[in-house]
Image (cartoon, grey):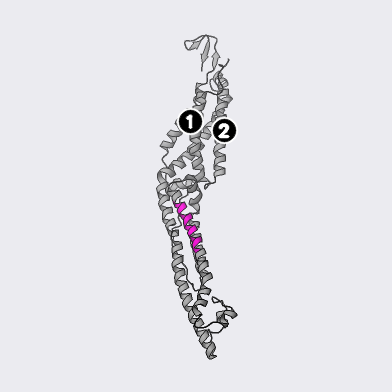
Amino acid sequence: MTEFKQDNFTFVDIISLIFIFFLSTANFFALLYLTDGKMPISLAITVLVLVIYYAIMQVLKNKKQAMASKNYKSAATLWFLPFIGLSLFSLVLLVHFLNIENNVKPKVQAEVNEKINKVIGISTIYEEEASKDLQNYKSALTNKLRAYVKNRKSGKKYKGNTQDSLQIGKYVIDNQTLAIATLANLSSIVESNLSPIRNKVSENTKILKEVEAEAERRRQDFQNWNFLGVAKNYNTTNDFVTDSYKLLNEKLEELPMYQDMVLFQMDSHQLPLNSFSELNKVYPPNWFLPILIVVVIHLVILIPFITYKVRRYDNESTPSSIGGATEY
């Protein structure tokens, strides 16, 4: 028994590789979901599977002669087992990918959009509360200073209007400023005291606007269905919203008069995009289309093996033989 002399890499090998690459792309996207957007891990597994596919195809081609000589009952036929194993692995990933694309995607987009809307506008909430707080602070400080100046002139001291009360807590005015305080320069002292607070409010507003910008980027990732962004950010959406309000309340606590807290309500339920079995319980997938796709792709992948020619020389010539050699 001898083999035809054939090129090691032919046009059918290119076709096979194209379909392996197509299947690997779907595998990669599914792995992104399953690994919560961990690209290095997803890419490493995808490349490894692609290489194994190609290696098995080359082994099958090289072993075809041994298989054919024993009517495909030799040990070499066992090389089909890892090929079948990879096909089942790819089937699971394809089912997961198509299930998310066809059944889950609209639900995820609506859920994330509702949650992100809670973050958009936190800077406005802060600015409104800061404006009211500074107005209250300005009024309280003005009254306190006016009382201090009047009491100083009359020599009276009342609890709450003493010099100490203007130098502790939310009111921090140095002795030198208090010593020259008069009703005439009272407004300038108040404005001088408000200036650093206003600067802080401006800085905090900028920080909160950056959070809103991040929220908008996340929204766009989900609306445009950026695979990497969706896989990476979906399971952190609840934490992102919670942390945004935590930051808002921290900034509000820095205001001199603010003593409240902004509360929000959010449905913390999320779909298990990173679990094949759990997601299937919520949204049972359609298996027919993925199975059909995987079967067709793997038949195409097998073309180099199917078209690879070998001959077996028989003792007697048959109608299907050429000079006593049967083609496979």
User: In the rendering, at what x and y percent does residue 27 appear?
Assistant: 50, 39
In the image, residue 283 above or below residue 1: below
Disc 2 target residue: 52
Dividing the picture into quadrants, the one containing residue 39 is top right
Residue 92 in view in this figure: no
Residue 198 among those drawn in magenta: no
Badge 2 amino acid:
Ile
Out of 158 and 71, give the one closest to the viewer.
158
Disc 1 target residue: 298
Mark 1 vs 2, N-terminal side: 2
**Main secondary structure found in the magenta portion:** helix
Quadrant of the drawing holding the N terminus: top right
Q: Tell me where the magenta segment starts and ends, as one range.
A: 204-219
In the image, residue 141 above or below residue 44: below
Q: Few, some or many C-alpha atoms within 10 Å of disc 1 (few <14, some 14-19, many ≥20)?
A: some
Q: Which mark is residue 253?
A: none
Out of 163 and 72, give the one closest to the viewer.
163
- Give the Cα distance between marks 1 and 2: 14 Å
User: In the rendering, at what x and y percent does residue 283 appear?
Assistant: 42, 46
Residue 208 among those drawn in magenta: yes
Q: Which residue does the image show at 57% across and 43% down from the upper left?
A: 40
Out of 18 and 51, give the one closest to the viewer.
18
User: In the rendering, at what x and y percent does residue 177 appear?
Assistant: 57, 79
Dividing the picture into quadrants, the one containing residue 263 is bottom left
